[in-house]
Amino acid sequence: MEIPAALMKPRIFSGMQPTGELHIGNYLGALRNWARIQYDYEPIFCIVDQHAITVRQDPKTLRESCEKVAALYLAAGLDPAHSAVFVQSQISAHVELAWIFTCTVPFGWLGRMTQFKAKTLQAGGNQDSIGTGLFLYPVLMAADILLYQAKLVPVGDDQSQHMELTRNIAARFNKLYGRTFEIPATKLPMVGARIMGLDDPTRKMSKSANAPNHSISLLDPPGRVRKKIGRAKTDSQPGVNWENPGAGVSNLLTIFQAFSDWSDERMSLHFPDMRYGALKKEVTEMVNAKLEPIQRRFAELMDNRDYLRGVLRGSAARVAPIAEETVRQAKKRTGLYSL
């Protein structure tokens, strides 16, 4: 029996690249939130390995990283019986739709994308040293989302430009060829805490940062977590100034509150005037306590690759019909030949 449209939950889609180590910023800013909201939606979560190869990757490492990230998705709380968890390259419709979009997107739209301009500047303006995939990957990102007719995309505000491009691509295609794609809402589900770098609390914690004490990996052992937090930047004040903490102290407090779910009132009663050594000790203990069950579940999943791969296969099989139907409609609209 078909479910009435009014009773269907809105579909959401999001994903992460399998490059670099997933860190507590990824968890507190996205993964934990995905787990919390998953039952309110029809959730599709992807490991976007085709985005990863916009820069050269070691093939063996990339394949292994896909399974590690899938295991972390599940260890962080995604329920494979409800949430689809798969690897992007399992479903060829992603790149098939991306090519159709590439042929409809104006060149200027992509040239204005911030990341491409930043990479061009880093290369001294020499575009010959930048892969074409880096220029075109926002189109693939749009295809990822629109392929599943997602209504909402739970990503942070740093992805707002890509989301706007996705909406523009959908609107342009619908105008040229007739309504085919759901235009995802720009109002996103609740996003998690914004965690900054331990070494530079003015910049968001990043997987691509190379500094050894920049981030805390979800798989860091307790001793390493202690060492990294111990070296985290604070400020010149003797203790926590609750009314006006420096950026580094504020970041440590944010990490503690995000993991503990303490209220502002409880935080304000507990931390004012606390010495930084004591603050770092409490943050370390909280982080390690919350990472322990994630790490334990991750180890179990990595020791049972048959189960993990079964989840990836089963999820891909579940969502592939949605993707294939979308591509079928797009091909029909554009006149591409099929029987």
Image (cartoon, rainbow, N blue to C red):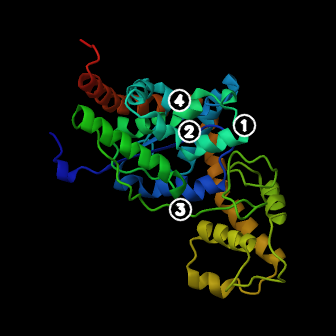
Image quadrant holding the C terminus, namely top left
Q: Nearer the viewer, mark 4 or mark 2?
A: 2
Q: Which mark is residue 70?
A: 2
Query: Could you tell me which residue is drawn at 25 percent across and 38 percent down?
Result: 175
Residue position for label 4: 309
Residue position for label 1: 123
Q: Dot 4, how many residues are within 10 Å of its Cα: few (below 14), some (14-19), or many (20+)?
A: some
Q: Secondary structure at mark 2?
A: helix
Q: Is residue 172 left or right of residue 161?
A: left
In the rendered structure, which amino acid carries the disc numbered 4?
Arg
Q: In the image, residue 263 lies at what x, y percent? A: 55, 79
Image quadrant holding the N terminus, namely top left
Q: Nearer the viewer, mark 2 or mark 1?
A: 1
Q: Earlier in the sequence, mark 4 or mark 2?
A: 2
In the foreground, 119 or 40: 119
Q: Earlier in the sequence, mark 2 or mark 1?
A: 2
Q: Are marks 1 and 3 in contact (CB under 8 Å)?
A: no
In the rendered structure, which amino acid carries the disc numbered 3?
Gly
Residue position for label 3: 192
